[in-house]
Amino acid sequence: MDPSTASDVLTVHGGTALSGEVRVRGAKNLVPKAMVAALLGHGTSVLHNVPEISDVRIVTGLLEAHGVTVTRGAGPDTLILDPASVEAASDAAVEAHAGTSRIPVLLCGPLLHRLGRAFIPDLGGCKIGDRPIDFHLDALRAFGAVVEKRPEGLLILAPERLRGTHIRLPYPSVGATEQVLLTAVLAEGVTELSNAATEPEIVDLIAVLQKMGAIISVHNDRVVRIIGVDRLDGFTHRALPDRLETASWACAALATGGDIRVVGAQQGEMMTFLNVFRRIGGDFEVDDTPGSESIRFWHSGGQMRALALETDVHPGLSTDWQQPLVVALTQAHGLSIVHETVYEQRLGFTQALNRMGAQIQLYRECLGGSACRFGQRNFQHSAVISGPTKLHGAELTIPDLRAGFSYLIAALAAQGTSMVHGISLIHRGYEDFEAKLSGLGAVVELGVAA
Ligand code: EPZ
């Protein structure tokens, strides 16, 4: 959607402490992958706790283009996926459904097993760095696939059944780990994956595959072993809750001096974030009553405290928690340091915060922690944040999903009115966020204020 159209602008009147309750459903970074895993099964799969977000709509379109029937189940958040009539999609159909998502790359393994062929259009996804797929392609080649460059994308072929192999990832890439998992489960023989990512969403995808009949073991040194099988069945699974959306609401409570209960959130996947949240000056309360799990987040009332933070792969501080935390740190007393070690260009969004009155300086050096891959290259991947600063409204254009929601948090914490353009990007990962904001007392209106 064109960011300049009125329906893609949200006017935010800041200065209100957000208070109330929101619900999070299944994780944006698991649900589409579980949907892709359904392609591997010889039976129907049922996925519960599915959020209404555009990433799910994009993958639904992609799967339907390949002959999978995707229908809504009895509950509003249930999908039923039937891969009985999987067929090759035209490259144009894949391209048409790829949208802004990077998910098409994960269809390769399942399609190579089912059809011997897969096509990857040039990928979308958030503009937070180069985001190459070399690890993915190297892994597919290691399984015996052939990768051919085409003008509009990549054609990948499996001349014969893919074979298990040993793959060591140069970096614990989430997507590349998923690529190997989704390919190894039906490959002939054993696959050993070294330096694998172990994010909660990866573990949940492994649970889905195990339910289908896969044999996967996770070892303590980031090694994952998969024993290939000849056949997988469908699964029934309830997706884990979205720890990234939950953290965004927590930072909104902190930055606006509010109190928000996030229904559906679970502590286990958020331990690192919860420690940071408490150290900054927030407080939280976990309710782990089965069936009514929630975490309540609030500003504890005292001065917020500056911190030195470094993002890392799990169980470190997730890079997807960085941007909302940066907004909260603009309200902390003192100098905070944020060292972004996962993506080389995920601090660019701070320029707009400075236009709102924040004082954030970016550096090429690795500040506040250990040296990372970007230290000797020309990337401003460390930030020093001086606070507290009074934020005022501004005109903002969203660069990526997480920065987008972080701009909303800044606009809500600011005095005055902001116009936030390109909010369709936020719909990729935050279900019904306008209604949730209004329900928390935020004064927001779609379109440019009259
Ligand atoms: C997933 O992206 C998530 N997206 C991202 O969330 C998340 O930030 C990221 O993992 C890290 O946790 C989805 O799951 C849909 P990576 P992914 O491969 O898999 C480099 C959000 O806001 N790399 O772990 O694409 C890459 O450039 C999104 O929800 C290669 O060099 O991330 C990056 O520096 C944003 N070559 C690092 O690895 C490759 O082939 C981590 O990327 C692949 C990755």
Image: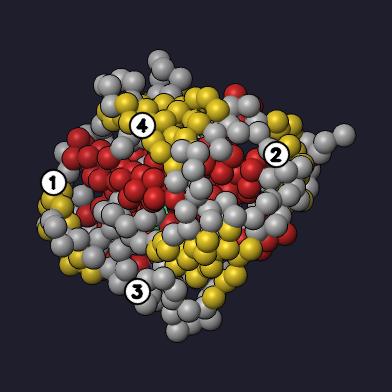
> Residue 349 occupies which quadrant of the picture?
bottom right
Gap between marks 2 and 3, in whole Å? 37 Å
Look at the numbered disc 3 and give the secondary structure of its residue.
loop
Relative side of 281 to 236, left or right? right
Q: Is residue 315 above or below residue 46?
A: below
Q: Is residue 225 visible?
A: no
Which one is in front in this view, the residue at disc 3 or the one at disc 4?
4
Q: Label 4 amino acid?
A: Glu
Gap between marks 3 and 1, in whole Å? 36 Å
Quadrant where the N terminus sits is top right
Query: Which of marks 4 and 1 precedes in the sequence?
Result: 1
Residue 14 has which mark? 2
Residue 382 has which mark? none
Residue 285 has which mark? 4
Q: Label 3 amino acid?
A: Ser
Return the residue found at the far bottom.
Answer: 376
Query: Which of marks 4 and 3 precedes in the sequence?
Result: 4
Q: Which residue is mark 3?
A: 370
